[in-house]
Amino acid sequence: MPRGVARNLSALPTPFATLIRPAGTLAGRKIMKRSIAAIFAAAVAPLVLAQNPEQPAVIVTATRLPQAQSQTLQPVKVIAAEDIAQAGQQSIVEVLQSLGGVEITSTGGFGQPSSVFMRGANSGQTLVLIDGMRISSATTGTTALENLSLAQIERIEIVPGEMSSLYGADAIGGVIQIFTKSGKYTPGANVSVGAGSYDTHSASAGINSRADKTDFSVNVGYFKTKGFDATKSSLPSGAPNPNNNPDLDGYRNANFSGKLAQHLDERNEIGFTAFWSDGKTHFDNGPTTDDLNHQTLSAYSVYSRNHINSIWQSLLKAGQSTDDLVVTGAFPGSFRTTQPQFSWQNDVKVGPGTAIAGLEYLAQKVASDTDYTQTHRTIKSAFAGYGGEIGKHAWQVNVREDSNSQFGDHGTGSLGYAYRLTSGLRFRFGAGTAFKAPTFNDLYFPGFSNPDLRPERSRSAEAGVNYQTGNNRLTVTYFENQITDLIVFDPATSTPQNLSQARNKGTELSYEGTFWGLKANSKLTVQDPVDESTGKLLPRRAREYGSVVLSNATGPWRLGGELVASGARFDQPNEASGTRMHGYGLVNLTASYALDRDWSIRARWNNVFNREYELAQNFNTPGSNVFVSLQYQPGEDKSSATPPPRGAAD
């Protein structure tokens, strides 16, 4: 199958206790559920303990306006650069799984196609932004997360739930916005080198500073690994895997980001942002060919932020992103997506709240050696909203109209409300609608497409409670999402099809805080993502998954441990026979030591018990492996347990 279509398949959608008992048995599954719940409960039990206040995170993705994390009407998760550094991980999807609490899939090791699922939605139904720019493929409909380097990231904001009323198409499951390093908030300089299992090596360096009225940032990185064999040698039936090539499937990536901001005065700022990532990934597509993906992601933008007067702020941004994929081997091909983008957002203080209104333009252009019937479409959008807080009451209302040149007009809206019972206890409610247009592969890829597909539409509702005391924050959210005309790849016809309706109901529990000298970050999701016509699980989605991350800082040492677990999943629709993937649980360990104020050494041991597990059927996953890095970052006191300011708004 051509790699351009295989990428779509990957974008579809053994716990700790089962180290003793197989996860595939009924008893094993019950133990897995109880183990996740018990470990999560153990993490949240000391909620009433530590009360050391820290600077609250400032979120911009939830409403397109800066606001404290405690004021948002969604259960937003922020992952800061220091969190990423302490984790010592080398893959963004694994960081999103362990620290962000999202569900992931991957067809092999480093550089292999990887995806995330949020609230049971397809991977293409989660919108990924980099510094406010869409950077995705119009052919596959997803962002190549496997080619995004952690070395360039200042913070990540994860907002689950329907967000189309703010961001348009693709935000059915939620939004993940990645902010690259800047001269405003990132420490002045950094250098890091590392090495680990699978002959893995990395290096990165950056300068982030401010001179008078100018902020500037330049960061570069390089990563290389020989990897391991991405595909299994045999199928579940025992037959040889026809796609397997018993070689090492290595990966190489070079990356860069830069920012320049000029403050004309206290009220006006102009700037430029740039991002570039170039990855080469070897993969298996048969025993006799050396197959290679060469993918380049890039984005640039210019902007002008202006305070027109005391109540009106304007942000004007224009730019372009590119996803350029060249495949060599058994099924060679080239797929290039170019997306010119323009936005104008206005924020106006009105009464007790702030109103937003704006216009957006997005063009999607495909250039390929594959004969697509259509290669261009445009989306013109207008959006407005109003949010604020009076006493114990808070609200947020948003509406948006998107005019797609292929599929006409789509209106979406959302409504959120919260009531603060006490200073630390808050109840919240929300509802919204969203949509996603089919991709160019879905519609036009020769032999593997369906030109009669309809856009996916969804309605959702959620209710939750936030409880915060000191640094400890507990969030519980019940959600319900119904997707009409969900697009799922049908292996029987080798084409995508619209399901009549899919539904996901579930509960998310998360805890962040400190107790007994431990810093904790845990999340558990229990859900039921099914095709309503059959009651069967959607592909590659589990009924329960979660993570617990604990760390302790004592003097120059910081030690940590992670448990990441998932229930059983099916690799194909309708729980097709022979495609069941067992639940799994992984234990990872981390350690760091501050050699002095400027130098530190960090180590990570993944999959400590060397458990075999699957994220996609017939594809291998990493065994027990280690990675050690040496970091130089002048001016930061790494022996202090007090974290730096988090999540400042761009």
Image (cartoon, rainbow, N blue to C red):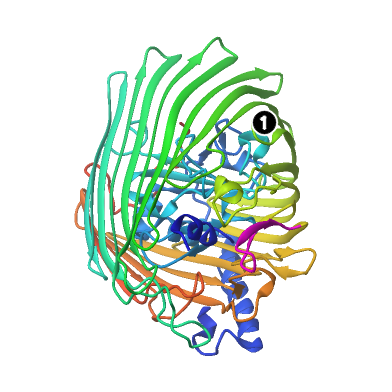
Q: Position of residue 22 (x, y in %)?
A: 55, 88
Circle 1 residue: 402
Q: Is residue 292 above or below residue 128?
A: below
Q: Quadrant of residue 541?
A: bottom right
Q: Residue at x 51, y 57 (%)?
A: 5
Query: How dense is the environment of label 1, judged by Cα within 10 Å: few (below 14), some, or many (20 and up)?
Result: many
Q: Is residue 62 above or below residue 378?
A: below
504 or 360: nearer the viewer: 360
Report if residue 257 is visible in the image: yes
Q: Quadrant of residue 578?
A: bottom right
Q: Residue furthest top?
A: 309
| Residue 645 falls within the magenta-colored stretch | no
Q: Residue at x 49, y 74 (%)?
A: 614
Q: Residue at x 36, y 25 (%)?
A: 272
Q: Quadrant of residue 304?
A: top left
247 or 551: nearer the viewer: 247
Could you tell whether 501 is left or right of 609 in the image? right
Q: Residue at x 61, y 67 (%)?
A: 491
Q: Looking at numbered disc 1 in the image, what kind of residue is underneath it?
A: Asp
Could you tell whether 516 is left or right of 385 in the image? left
Q: Magenta segment, which residues?
A: 488-499
Q: Position of residue 639 (x, y in %)?
A: 29, 54
Q: Secondary structure at mark 1?
A: strand
Q: Position of residue 260 (x, y in %)?
A: 32, 26
Could you tell whether 131 is left or right of 37 in the image? left
Could you tell whether 356 is left or right of 300 in the image? right
Q: Is residue 324 above or below residue 110?
A: above
Report if residue 469 is visible in the image: no
628 or 373: nearer the viewer: 373
Q: Position of residue 76 (x, y in %)?
A: 58, 47
68 or 16: nearer the viewer: 16
